Image (cartoon, helix red, strand yellow):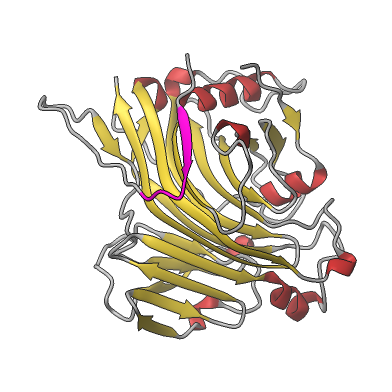
Amino acid sequence: MKKTLSMLLPISLLVLASCSGGNVSSLPSSSSEESSSVSEDTSSSTSSSTSSSEEVKEVELFGDPDFKTGFDLKSTSTSDAHVVKHLDYNGAAEECDPAIWNMAQWWTPFDFQYAPYTYENGYHTYQNESRTLKVNTDTGEIVMQLNSWLEYQERFGGSRTDTSQTWSHFLIEQTFEQSMTLAELNSLTLHFDFCVEEATLFDEEHYNPAFHAAQFIMYFTIRNYDFDNFFWFGVPLYDNRGNDSNPSYNIDQGFEGATNSLIYRMGQRDYIPSGTKIGQKYTIDIDLIPFLQEALITGSTVTSNPPLAGWDWNKCYINYMNAGWELPGSFNIVSSMSNLSLIAERA
């Protein structure tokens, strides 16, 4: 199927421009047809298998997919990103140094490091004025709730009114222990379950879809051994304005914390063709390799000054991810994710 590639509308450029989880690090690597599917109301997990030979053929890139080790919580500003607290479930988290998971809370006026902790019905819970984190380390489920309306009331006295104003984020992130060179892989299979349980719009009177939105998305960073830059590769999961079926791109620039990198997003029609519905559970199971190849072609050819000019597929590697919410609009959102897996199958 031929794909249509489009530049993002201003709101998408705005929302996606802050996809960074903060300081994105680089790790050296240890040394067709699309394959994708989505099913509803199912809960299945993907397990890794290994070859009997010396070399492991399948590698799980996600560390601690059940969140047993907790989170290093970052500060509220991307201009001074640093860890302010380890969310260790009141001492119940498994020890791990350095931390596997980080958590970003960009631009909140209610610092999540002071959120009280409780444990009930299998869930480790942190909750403050505007957001809630619930983690079940037995099932690997993470529930995230964010009320950006309360945050904008505190910061601006109402909804954002200018595109230069920063917006609310609630993200989880990690740098992979193994950075896989993409050319050595037969497949790179992303698998997880998710559900957007609520996405309630506040301040409808001032709502402008040109720069107010609620977006739930997963990002990866792709680097190249011959270059210092990287590009963002996005897997959109929800947008309150509807399903964006076509692949799209923009440059991350023009505001505080911008990385000046290419942002490429998959078209949702390849894995959720009907669009994400509130309250519906989805299972994503998709080989990212053909889409990553398309992203590299796009970044090497678009505009008169391609951001990925000279990049060689054989020297590209994947090393980082983040997932969660960006809310430049005034919303209350609730989502859940579980059964996280990213299986790299070597050729």
Q: Quadrant of the N terminus?
A: top right
Q: Which residues are magenta?
A: 36-43
Residue at (53, 34) in percent of width and height: 228
Q: Nearer the viewer, residue 214 or 275?
A: 275
Relative to 235, is 107 on the left or the right? right
Residue at (50, 18) in percent of width and height: 312
Residue 42 colored in magenta in the image? yes
Q: Quadrant of the C terminus?
A: top left
Q: Name the spot of residue 104 as percent of width and height, x first.
A: 53, 63
Hey, which residue is sitting farthest front in the picture? Answer: 41
Q: Name the spot of residue 64 as percent of width and height, x first.
A: 30, 55
Relative height, residue 254 to residue 328 (above, below): above
Hey, which residue is sitting farthest top in the picture? Answer: 32
Relative to 51, is 329 on the left or the right? right
Residue at (32, 46) in percent of width and height: 45
Q: What's the magenta bit mostly, secondary-structure-wise?
A: strand
Q: Nearer the viewer, residue 294 or 48?
A: 48
- The answer to whether one can see residue 17 in this image is no
